[in-house]
Amino acid sequence: DGGITQSPKYLFRKEGQNVTLSCEQNLNHDAMYWYRQDPGQGLRLIYYSQIVNDFQKGDIAEGYSVSREKKESFPLTVTSAQKNPTAFYLCASTLGGARGYTEAFFGQGTRLTVV
Amino acid sequence: GDSVTQMEGPVTLSEEAFLTINCTYTATGYPSLFWYVQYPGEGLQLLLKATKADDKGSNKGFEATYRKETTSFHLEKGSVQVSDSAVYFCALSDGYGNKLVFGAGTILRVKS
């Protein structure tokens, strides 16, 4: 079955550590996205990528980094510069490209907690 | 910039009650509009969508009509079930940046 897989489901980070959240899709989608979800604030866009080897900052990119070396993969690194990283992180993908925006498919999310 | 405003929750209803969740938007272009649903501990799933004015999206008994004159996309269901309990997000895409802008989400709780 096609879909988006995020791992791990739960992640704990110590102060000062970098951690990487995995996102893999087998939908052959061009565009991929990372969102952060906090209670009562909806989803906020961290980074997005419309094509391999290219990505753009979203609304809250500070303290995060991404790479897009393969079409299927869009890992997110939460760096020590992110002062309040505890949140639920969602990865999504769309067909993208010249087809414009189409339905977004979401992963199951990763809950990151600072300990 | 583009934005989406949803009614605050939580919304608590009895089974078989009528549901309305209000959503209004601000956009400079001609956005596509979406409702997504999130069940506890999961990602989001597309519930329905409308891509132009006066379009009606529908799925699983839920409906929403794209009203350009009132910049609204209210979600309705005639008879809710306990299994509809979830968080509902209204969202728009301007079609240019391939990005979604979400509302804050509305928690729906349905009691039997």
Image (cartoon, grey):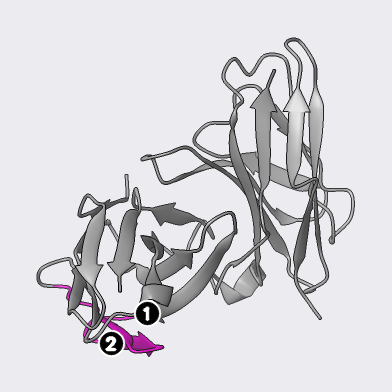
* Magenta stretch contains residue B22: no
Q: Are marks 1 and 2 in contact (CB under 8 Å)?
A: yes
Q: Is residue B112 left or right of residue A37?
A: left
Residue shown at the point (75%, 64%) measured from the top left: A4
Q: Secondary structure at mark 2?
A: loop
Q: Which residue lies most toward the top here?
A: A16
Q: Which residue lies most toward the left here?
A: B69
Looking at this view, is B20 or A115 the one in front? A115
Q: Is residue B9 left or right of residue A112?
A: left
Measured as percent of width and height from the top left, residue B36 is found at 44, 67
Residue shown at the point (80%, 45%) measured from the top left: A8
What's the mark number on residue B55? 2
Residue type at tag 1: Thr
Looking at this view, is B1 or B6 the one in front? B6
- Subunit of label 1: B
Looking at this view, is A58 or A88 the one in front? A88
- Subunit of label 2: B
Looking at this view, is B107 or A71 the one in front? B107
Q: Quadrant of residue A76?
A: top right
Q: Secondary structure at mark 1?
A: loop
Measured as percent of width and height from the top left, residue A90 is found at 62, 50
Q: Magenta region: which residues?
A: B52-68
Residue A64 visible here: yes
What's the mark number on residue B51? 1
